[in-house]
Image (cartoon, rainbow, N blue to C red):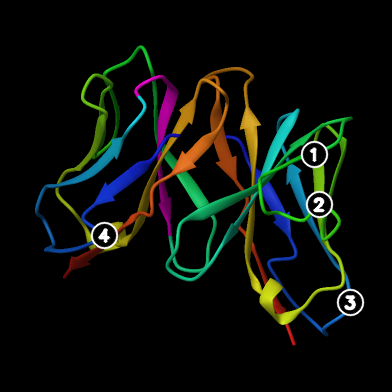
Amino acid sequence: KQEVTQIPAALSVPEGENLVLNCSFTDSAIYNLQWFRQDPGKGLTSLLLIQSSQREQTSGRLNASLDKSSGRSTLYIAASQPGDSATYLCASRNRDDKIIFGKGTRLHILP
Amino acid sequence: GAVVSQHPSWVICKSGTSVKIECRSLDFQATTMFWYRQFPKQSLMLMATSNEGSKATYEQGVEKDKFLINHASLTLSTLTVTSAHPEDSSFYICSADWTGGGIAGELFFGEGSRLTVL
């Protein structure tokens, strides 16, 4: 059974710093891995999706990597801004089409 | 990206009543939609997978008679919480599978519906 873990659970960093959020999964036979952002009381906004054949995806200040062999994905945020404060969730989509979410990392960017 | 709209965004109801939540894909057709439940500061728990034109597939522990799902068209899925009780109070979120035009298997989410049962 796939398990997705996100570390750390919470993170506070000063504005302007680069940071890395981690996501690990136990079953490497995934179809894709997707990163989301969730603001309090809101739905999820898709940030990046990495197909199993890809190693990374970039969008603006965000870069997500995927290493299936080690069961890891990272979300890199460059030059963090207060507006980046949110909960970031990763989710793996497995070959049986099950989508498993991590518990998220609550990110707080200090002005 | 694709847009998924959820309505209502919040609802308060009395115990014993039924509440319907709608999930619409606005600019694409979704043969598959997913319904999730989220407790405060917790991750999303998949409740059921909704397939257009067929019965929904419920996850273990989710009462199908309690949470009625209907996916009558390629752009609309509904979740009805029947005979709601205070323990059903939660944040319900839907997502739709976008398989056309670009990235296969990308999920897009609605804004969520907060249900409070008095």
Pointers 1 and 2 in contact (C-beta within 8 Å):
yes
Chain letter for mark 4: A
Does the magenta portion include A54? no
Quarter of the view holding residue A90: top left
Residue pushed farthest top?
Answer: A53
Q: Secondary structure at mark 4?
A: loop
Q: Residue at x 27, y 38 (%)?
A: A24
Q: Which mark is residue B117?
A: none
Q: Residue B74 at x, y = what percent?
A: 82, 31
Badge 4 is on which residue?
Answer: A9
Say the numbered circle drawn on residue B56.
Answer: 1
> In what element is the residue under mark 2?
loop
Residue at image mark 3 = B17
| Quarter of the picture holding the C terminus of chain B | bottom right
Tell me the distance, in whole angstroms, between the alpha carbons under discs 1 and 2.
Answer: 9 Å
Q: Earlier in the sequence, mark 1 or mark 2?
A: 1
In what element is the residue under mark 1? Answer: loop
Q: Position of residue A59 (x, y in %)?
A: 31, 33
Residue at the disc numbered 2: B64
Q: Earlier in the sequence, mark 3 or mark 1?
A: 3
